[in-house]
């Protein structure tokens, strides 16, 4: 597989997000689903709708989200919709909770390392293309969260999230946390699920990672650590594997004093195993050319 193109800028503004999309020279046809993280109640680090607005408007997109599988304000349709309103998303955009009502859509993963199916919100069938806008940061389960996490856990329904976390053995959010898969199995399950969504929108999907508010915790945490590193920039690519690999490489290359704390979270949870597994599945490559846009 030839090297992927990954674009990079140190400038982090709403307008620069649009520019980083444009440099990919990709057409997202028809109705565009824009996957974001809407932020758990109490979280201070998630990227606000005002920041996303120029990019979403540029593709005339619809914000899409899915329910969670853990305690909080997003694990039911009723609570999640209320929080989406409270966080200001509906003030600026049409918002579609993909798994607001069942039944889920089953995506086949014939060559999956762990999972042979992924469950996503059925409303995904209403979209012709997808834009993945990811806040790159740490994660208390996966080590880090970026494009692959958005593709997998982010697009999975509640049942799908349970399958990913349990390595395909549990579909009930009430018991999944007592049946967590071994860490490498979990990472491979994320890679499997990510492949299913990437393949579903193949040729009609693009990715932007924003490396800011670099906490070791995810935007899914109601009580999250404050950022431990200075902002790094915005990266974009048509290859989610290369994109996440480039972000991880920038962390390793950083001279920021908070780098070690961030990397301890990534390494302790084998975060890069997700990238390795995704590359092995073949829907992306770890080999990339970093193209500076500044």
Image: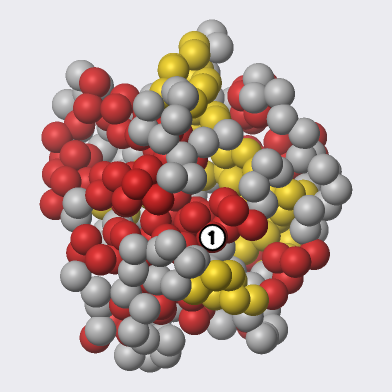
Q: Does residue 7 appear in the picture of this structure?
A: yes
In the rendered view of the protein, which quadrant contains the N terminus? top left
Q: Residue at x 36, y 78 (%)?
A: 168
Q: Residue at x 42, y 89 (%)?
A: 172
On screen, residue 27 versus residue 167, left or right, reads right
Answer with the quarter of the image where residue 174 lies: bottom left
The percent coordinates of residue 182 (x first, y second) are 19, 70
The percent coordinates of residue 144 (x first, y second) are 32, 48
Which residue carries the number 1 mark? Answer: 196
Answer with the quarter of the image where residue 82 lies: bottom right
Q: Around disc 1, counting alpha carbons within 10 Å, would you say few (fewer than 14), some (14 to 19), or many (20 or more)?
A: many
The percent coordinates of residue 75 (x first, y second) are 50, 79
The percent coordinates of residue 64 (x first, y second) are 67, 60
Answer with the quarter of the image where residue 95 lies: bottom right
Q: Is residue 171 above or below residue 99?
A: below
In the rendered view of the protein, which quadrant contains the C terminus? top right
Q: Residue at x 31, y 33 (%)?
A: 248
Front residue of 107/268: it is: 107
Q: Is residue 271 above or below residue 292?
A: below
Front residue of 58/13: it is: 58
Q: Is residue 252 above or below residue 161?
A: above
Q: Residue furthest top?
A: 294
On screen, residue 285 versus residue 259, left or right, reads right
Front residue of 123/257: it is: 123
Q: Residue at x 49, y 73 (%)?
A: 117
User: For numbered disc 1, what is the local secondary structure?
Assistant: helix
Q: Residue furthest right?
A: 30
């Amino acid at each position: 597989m030839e090297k992927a193109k990954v674009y990079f800028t140190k400038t982090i503004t709403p307008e620069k997000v649009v520019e980083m999309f444009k440099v990919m020279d990709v057409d997202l046809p028809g109705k565009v689903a824009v996957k974001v993280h809407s932020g758990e109640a109490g979280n201070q680090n998630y990227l606000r709708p005002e920041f996303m607005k120029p990019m979403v408007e540029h593709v005339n997109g619809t914000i899409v989200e899915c329910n969670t599988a853990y305690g909080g304000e997003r694990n039911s349709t009723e609570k999640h919709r209320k929080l989406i309103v409270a966080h200001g998303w509906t003030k600026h955009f049409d918002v579609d909770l993909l798994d607001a009502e069942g039944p889920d859509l089953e995506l086949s993963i014939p060559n999956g390392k762990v999972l042979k199916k992924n469950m996503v919100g059925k409303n995904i069938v209403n979209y012709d293309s997808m834009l993945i806008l990811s806040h790159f940061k740490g994660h208390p389960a996966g080590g880090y969260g970026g494009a692959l996490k958005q593709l997998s856990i982010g697009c999975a329904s509640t049942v799908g999230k349970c399958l990913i976390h349990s390595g395909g053995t549990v579909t009930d959010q009430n018991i999944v946390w007592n049946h967590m898969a071994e860490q490498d199995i979990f990472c491979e399950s994320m890679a499997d699920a990510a492949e299913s969504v990437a393949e579903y929108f193949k040729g009609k999907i693009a990715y932007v990672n924003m490396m800011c508010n670099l906490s070791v915790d995810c935007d899914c945490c109601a009580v999250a650590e404050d950022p431990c590193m200075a902002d790094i920039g915005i990266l974009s690519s048509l290859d989610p594997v290369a994109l996440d690999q480039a972000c991880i490489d920038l962390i390793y290359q950083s001279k920021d004093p908070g780098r070690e704390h961030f990397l301890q979270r990534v390494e302790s949870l084998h975060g890069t195993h997700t990238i390795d597994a995704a590359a092995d599945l073949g829907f992306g490559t770890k080999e990339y050319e970093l193209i500076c846009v500044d």
